[in-house]
Amino acid sequence: MSRTSIGVSPELNDYLVAHGTPPDAVQRDLIERTLALGDPAGMQIAPEQGAFMTLLTRMIGARRAVEVGTFTGYSALSIARGLPEDGYLLCCDVSEEWTAIARDAWERAGVADRIELRLGPAAETLRALPADPVFDLAFIDADKPAYPTYYEELLLRMRPGGVILVDNVLQDGRVLQKDPEHPNTAAIQEFNDMVAADDRVDVVMLPIADGVTFAVKR
């Protein structure tokens, strides 16, 4: 996946990032460390997406958040920075290697005390949580065929007015393909249709990075 907003030229994307809150030293270092991983680096969210997530976390007054798919920690860092000092973010991932990079960044950014990382299948982690509507914000950015499972488990646990953000919903534009060859694209097409028809949420799809669905629980 591209780490720049879809349909935006590299020059315009640089302008866009430069005219928002720019990545700081910790974030720039995290970007560089992630780029050194090679192809997997495409899974990192774009800088403008991170800035948006920090602002949104603050705007809705989120105190309890959860994310599915942490990778090297840029999205978690972005959310954690928007939480109050006593805020809480639960991160679900399966990779000790990639999240070790995340832990280091969180420590250097001074937000590690707000984050709990649980390694293991995310669906199992979510199902083990109490079925109480206590979360204010959730972010899904993991294996695409499992998006419906993560969405349902999270929606149950979101407070009314809580926000679920879902990443990669445009699939570099491939969501327009009638018979997509890539299974991720087919999975996202089905997921997008499901959320658009879900009367439990109000929803808008934003063309930030590779597309972000913004669903608010009614």
Image (cartoon, rainbow, N blue to C red):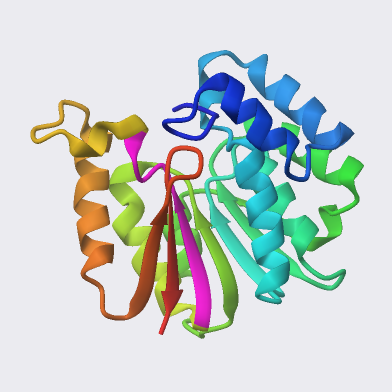
Q: Position of residue 64 (x, y in %)?
A: 67, 73
Any magenta on residue 169? yes
Q: On the picture, is 26 further left or further right than 99?
A: right
Q: On the picture, is 198 further left or further right than 150?
A: left
- How many discs mark residues in the rendered view? 0
Any magenta on residue 183? no
| Rendered-image quadrant of the N terminus | top left
| Rendered-image quadrant of the C terminus | bottom left
Dominant SS of magenta comes to strand
Q: On the picture, is 81 further left or further right than 195?
A: right
Q: Where 127 sits versus 96, above or below?
A: below
Q: Where 52 sits versus 94, above or below?
A: below
Q: Between 170 and 162, which is closer to the camera in this rendering?
A: 170
Q: Which residues are magenta?
A: 161-171
Q: Position of residue 34 (x, y in %)?
A: 67, 23
Q: Quadrant of residue 23?
A: top right
Q: Is residue 174 visible?
A: yes
